[in-house]
Image (spheres, rainbow, N blue to C red):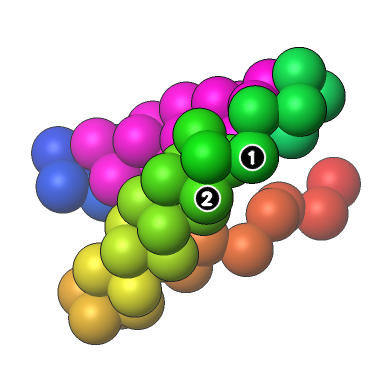
Amino acid sequence: MDAFTTGILQRIHTTESDLRKARETGDEFLAEVEQGELDDLRRLAAEHGVDVRPKVA
């Protein structure tokens, strides 16, 4: 896995976690910001052929 792929997947994971926390605490503004960031990261990953779907064991 190259550095770009590793980096984007880590950023997606971190943003998903931050989004969950914002939702759990009821911070609607932060949740919207995190959702926008997540959408952007997923779009960027798709543009570069990075599969961001969860891996099934």
Query: Which three-letter amino acid code belongs to the residue tagged 2?
Result: Glu
Q: Residue at x 55, y 26 (%)?
A: 18
Measured in 3D between alpha carbons, the distance from the residue under mark 1 to the one under mark 2, in whole angstroms, is 6 Å
Label 2: few (<14), some or many (≥20) within 10 Å? some
Q: Residue at x 52, y 40 (%)?
A: 29
Check if mark 1's residue and mark 2's residue have beta carbons within 8 Å: yes
Residue 46 in view of the camera: yes
- The residue beneath circle 2 is 32
Query: Which three-letter amino acid code belongs to the residue tagged 1?
Result: Glu
- Find numbered disc 2 in the image and state the secondary structure of the residue it sits on: helix
On screen, residue 54 above or below 39 = above
Is residue 30 left or right of 24 when viewed as pictured?
A: left
Nearer to us in this view, 34 or 9:
34
Label 1: few (<14), some or many (≥20) within 10 Å? few
Number of marks in the rendered image: 2
- The residue beneath circle 1 is 28
Q: Residue at x 47, y 27 (%)?
A: 14
- Residue 7 image position (x, y, % from top left): 24, 36
Nearer to us in this view, 18 or 48:
18
* Residue 50 falls within the magenta-colored stretch: no
Name the quarter where the N terminus is drawn: top left
* Residue 21 falls within the magenta-colored stretch: yes
- Find numbered disc 1 in the image and state the secondary structure of the residue it sits on: helix
Magenta stretch, residue numbers: 7-22
- Residue 3 image position (x, y, % from top left): 14, 39
Q: Residue at x 65, y 28 (%)?
A: 27
Residue 38 in view of the camera: no
- Residue 36 image position (x, y, % from top left): 41, 58
Nearer to us in this view, 6 or 35:
35
Is residue 43 left or right of 34 when viewed as pictured?
A: left
